[in-house]
Image (cartoon, rainbow, N blue to C red):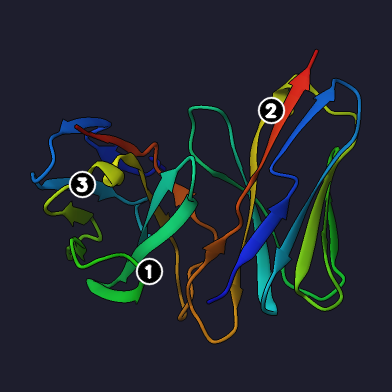
Amino acid sequence: KAGVTQTPRYLIKTRGQQVTLSCSPISGHRSVSWYQQTPGQGLQFLFEYFSETQRNKGNFPGRFSGRQFSNSRSEMNVSTLELGDSALYLCASSYSTGGRVETQYFGPGTRLLVL
Amino acid sequence: GQQVMQIPQYQHVQEGEDFTTYCNSSTTLSNIQWYKQRPGGHPVFLIQLVKSGEVKKQKRLTFQFGEAKKNSSLHITATQTTDVGTYFCAGYGGATNKLIFGTGTLLAVQP
């Protein structure tokens, strides 16, 4: 099976702009989670989508949003970018049968730099 | 909110030495997962522990889940340069359905 793919791999944006990141999960996985990774804060949970519905949400401002499509592909959007949004954004898919995700399979990440 | 701390933050060992990282949660965990992230890479799942006091081994790696299900450890015997990376624990705690990652331990192995 193909792994989790994320596009783009690298992005440079300026403050105030918005950005959309894409994630294609492993075939058959219905859960997609997003994480922000920075050297200072580690891996921070953004949100999780399951069957096109946001099932869980982390403690991030409303500028961070996401959605999931019927084919389980997911997008994450960050509006009004701030310098502090510079990070590696990781997507992880999981074959989730119940209310919780099981093993997380991570994609390579999108490295976002905000200038 | 729930916090998962790992110690040490960083450890530098000589190849062949043992290494242990500890994971401590502020709340009881229903399970614990361990991931490894190589430099420049993404986290890769290693193992999941579910039962209180459970111990699992993968070659030179030994994983343990505490009796109270609030802590866990990963022990590597006779480290190799291929063990370099950051090790994260992650778990579900309390009423939340969010998988919370620990702060991570960066392991450096000197040949």
Q: From what the image shows, is residue A27 above or below residue A7? A: below
Judged left or right of residue A60, residue B3 is: right
Q: Position of residue A66 (x, y in %)?
A: 21, 62
Tell me the subunit letter for badge 3: A
- Residue B99, relative to residue A19: is it above or below? below
Q: Position of residue A8 (x, y in %)?
A: 22, 34
Label 2: chain letter = B
Residue positioned 53% across, 77% down in the render = B1
For residue B42, above or below residue A77: above
Q: Which residue is mark 2?
A: B84
Q: Which residue is mark 3?
A: A82
Chain at numbered mark 1: A
Q: Secondary structure at mark 2?
A: loop
**Residue type, label 3:** Glu
Q: With B79 as the anchor, is A85 left or right in this view? A: left
Residue of label 1 = A58
- The C terminus of chain A: image quadrant: top left
Which residue in the rendered view is the most extreme toward the left?
Answer: A17
Asked which quadrant contains residue B19, the reply is top right
Between the residue at mark 2 and the residue at mark 3, the CA separation in whole angstroms equals 33 Å
Q: Is residue A10 visible?
A: yes
